Image: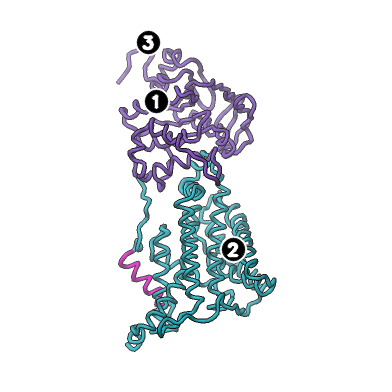
Amino acid sequence: MLKIANLHAYYGSIEALKGIDIEIAPGVVTCLIGSNGAGKTTLLKAISGMIRRTGSIVFDERNELIGESPTRIARRSIVHVPEGRHIFPGLSVEENLEVGTIAWHGFFGRKPYETEKRSVFDLFPRLEERRGQLGWSLSGGEQQMLAIGRALMARPKLLMLDEPSMGLAPVIVSDLFRKIVEINKLGIPILLVEQNARLALEISDFAYVLDQGRVRIEGKAKDLRTDPRVQEAYLGRFAGKTQPN
Amino acid sequence: MQGLNILLQPNVFMQLTINGVAMGMIYALMAMGLILLIRAIGVMNFAQGELLMLGAFITWGLTYQVKLPFVLMIPAAMLCFAFVGVVFMFVAYWPLRTASYPTATVISTMGAAMVIREIATITWGSLPLVSAPLVKGVVRVGSLRLQYQYLLTIAIGAVLIFLVFVLFEKLYAGRIMQAAAQDKYAAELLGIPTVLTTAATYIIVVTLASVGGYMIAPVFLVNVTLGTLQLRAFAGVVTGGFGSVKGAIVGSLFIGLVESYSSTFTTTYKDAVVFLVLIVVLLFRPQGLFGERVADKA
């Protein structure tokens, strides 16, 4: 459903992605793993149009996203949940969710979005409890739920999650990842960027390992879990050696 | 304390209260615009007074030069205000929004103030122009004589303030504008056209200030010096507490009243009294009368 070929991306004159080829299959969870500065976040920004890029990103086999603005891409229902959540601090939980509908709602008019809101509340009952509370006052985990919930309001055809586990307690993270799997079961393809490679590989179907702006390893997530190169570099296990403390 | 005795006469007091609230409304229209711009794009607009002045000139020109009847003058003026807003945005803000020196956008509003002043002087000259009140005459309530223009100013100010609140608190579009103001990055990722929301903000800001100019034109004369009223709006914003629209409105009304009441004591030092009060407020309540409703979470 998303086919990326020879993608280069730039921060000013610095080339952050150096020719990336990736394919995202419909209905599955695809993850990008890699160390800091490998280009995972940059790749998401390149897809959503937030930075300058060249190459080709074809969505749904006919729409070329290179050259399109972030607004245009969001209207294609490609939704990017950024690193650090970025929820609207001065809006309530419910208002944050409402704003998420802009991609299909349009600036004016009054299209109903009760169904979407209901299903987000069903997925995250915690958000319903806190519906009137202002965004800034939520805990980190709740903010992440809200960021994902807001993205679901946009009726995503592709959901891109950047570091959803960042700064959250392990018990909250495992809960959140169960929800991500649940969302995927609804038929929404997910592109997941995660520092926590072990966790990401557990819930993903397919995985790419990025390093210095290039794809180093790719394959089925269950194969990568046992790949010695991945284990050594990203899962903190030294192949054939005992693990030092 | 002869001034105090005069002020405490019920008639005088009522009269000054009405005048003060009317002037406060004008300041509030400007002050609201200041806050809306600070929230939406983080820019303190030093051309706010000039926008008010330009609004007075535009409506004067449409009434006395183009000679439009009132019912046509209002929509024509609205179109002009919207045009001024969009031009102001694309000239004074848009090219500089990604400048490496963020204060550039603030300084450019000071430049814009000079440009607007000069344009007004070239177009309409530097002599004060007379503008007739919307409705002539006075209302008598008992022994009280109240000018229609002041009452109308209060009413129109209140309506505009109400409309802005409805837009931002009740309408979908206003919610979207708030979101774009609070986090531009997230807004763009969700598909909010931030150019549109910013332009809409500018149009609202210019319209508020310009209507203020229109209402005040019969009270003062239409003159380039109307721009100096900006200082009252700043005083209102600071008194109310930076960042809160409600605070800005209350602060502005407060400044209007202080100014009005002080006129029984001195007319020469009216400006000084306003700023004396401002200093006192800052000394005892530096955060202003209202705090910010958004706090940062660590």
Residue range of the region highlighted in magenta in the rendering: B272-285
Residue A114 among magenta residues = no
Chain B's shade in the image?
A: cyan
Q: B44 above or below A172?
A: below
What colour scheme governs how the chains and residues are painted in the rendered image of this protein? Answer: by chain
Tag 2 residue: B112
In this rendering, would B150 be left or right of A236?
A: right
Question: What percent of the width, then of the height, locates residue B83?
Answer: 63, 59
Mark drawn on residue A240: 3
Q: Is residue B135 above or below residue A165?
A: below
The x and y percentages for residue B134 are 56, 75
Coordinates of residue B276 in the picture (x, y in percent): 37, 74
Asked whether B184 or B96 is in front, the reply is B184
**Mark whose residue sits in front, 1 or 3:** 1
Kindly identify which chain the residue marked by label 2 belongs to.
B
Residue B237 lies, with reference to residue A17, above or below; the image says: below
**Quadrant of res A124:** top left
Badge 3 local density, few (<14 within 10 Å), some, or many (20+)? few
Mark 2: amino acid: Ala
